[in-house]
Image: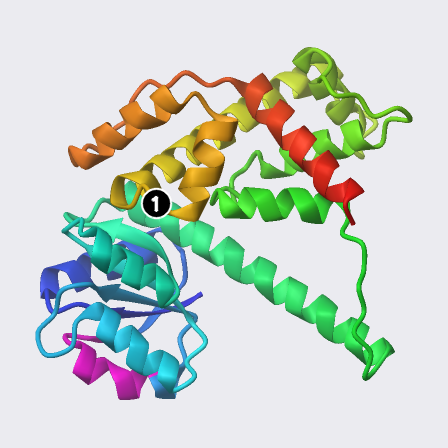
Amino acid sequence: MRYFIVDDDTASRTMLKKIIMEGELGVVIGEAESGVASITSILDMQPDVVLIDLLMPELDGIETIMKLRKEDFQGQFIMISQIVNKEMVGEAYENGVEFFIHKPINRVEVQSILRKTAEQFRLKDSLLAIRESLENINPGKTMQRKQSVKEIVLSILNDMGIIGEVGSDDIVKAMEVLMNESERRTQLPPLKDLYEAVAAKLDSPKVDIKKESKAIEQRIRRTILAAINNLASLGSIDNTNPEFEYYAPRYFDFQEIRHQMLHIQDSKFDSLKVKINSKKFLQVLYLETLDKYKKQ
C-alpha cells in the first residue's frame, strides 16, 4: 500500500511513518504539512490511502478531501482527529472517510486500522477485476450474478471491519458448512461440532481435527472481539453511524459494546475484558446470510 500523510504536526507525521515502516504495512510516498500544500502532490502521486488531519490551518481535512474528490481522486481517506464533533464526523463520512485514527496516536490502533483498510482495498480491487472480466465476456450487457455464500459473508464482515482478521476465513467456512447442509436449519448445531466440521474440510490429510477445531474456536473469538472493538470505536465517534446502528444491537450484547465505547472515549487503548458470545454472533450471521441468499 502507498500512503500519503497530511498533518501540520511534524511529530505526528514522523510517528505515523515509523509505525507504517516498522509494521511493514506499505510505503509512505509523500507528506505535507497542510491541506493546501498536499493537493498537487496527491493528484500527481495518486497514493492508495491518504492519512489526513481533521484540524489544519487554511484548509481543514474535510475541505481538502472535498477538493481532491472534485479532481476525481479515487484513493481512500483515513481521518486523524483529536476531537469528537458529530457534525464534522458526519461530514467526513459523507465525503468518503471510512476510518478515524484518534490522537494521541496509538501504535496498535494505527496498525489495526491500516490492515483493515488494506484488506478492503484488495477486496474492492478483486471485485473490480471480476466485474471487468464478466463485461469482457458479454460486452454491452449488464450481468446479474447470484452472490456466493462467501461473497455475502465477506460483505457483512467488511461492514464490521474484520475482513482482514485471522479468523475471517474460518467464519466464512463455517457459514459455507451450514449453508451446504441438505436441510437448512434455523438453529446452529453445538459449536464444537461446527468447528470440527470446518476443520474436517481443510486440505490436509494429517490435520488433527480436535486440535484444529480448538484453534478455529480461538481465531473466531479473536475476530469477534475485533468486531466489538471496531463497532465501539465507530459508536464512540458517531452513534448514528449506519454500521454501528445496524450491527451492534443485532450481533452483540449492547451493554458490552457500551462498556467498550466508554473505555475508548476515556482514551484507553489497552485491553478491556469483554464477554464474547460466539454462538450469538454466528447464529445471527447465519440467519442473515441465509436470508440474503434466498432473496437473490
Question: Is 82 on the left-hand or right-hand side of 202?
Answer: left
| Crowd tier of the residue under label 1, counting other residues whose Cα lies within 10 Å: few below 14, some 14–19, many 20 or above | some
Residue at x-position 19% and y-position 55%: 81
In the rendered structure, which segment of residues is drawn in magenta? 31-42
Quarter of the image holding residue 38?
bottom left
Question: Dot 1 corresponds to which residue?
Answer: 240
User: In this rendering, is residue 296 above or below 36?
Assistant: above
In front: 286, or 26? 286
Which quadrant of the figure contains the N terminus?
bottom left
Determine if residue 3 is in view: yes
Is disc 1 placed on a helix, strand or loop?
Answer: loop
Residue visible at 77% across and 27% down? 178
In the rendered image, residue 59, in percent from the top left (x then y), is placed at 15, 77
Most foreground residue, 112 or 102: 102
- Left or right: 153 as drawn, with respect to 28: right
Q: Position of residue 170 (x, y in %)?
A: 65, 32
Q: Position of residue 60 (x, y in %)?
A: 17, 71
Q: Is residue 71 above or below residue 259?
A: below
Q: How is the image coloured?
A: rainbow
Q: Is residue 35 on the magenta stretch?
A: yes
Q: Is residue 137 magenta?
A: no
Residue 66 image-quadrant placement: bottom left
User: In this picture, is 284 found above or below 66?
Assistant: above
Main SS type for the magenta part? Answer: helix
Instruction: Name the residue: 41% across, 40% down.
Output: 244
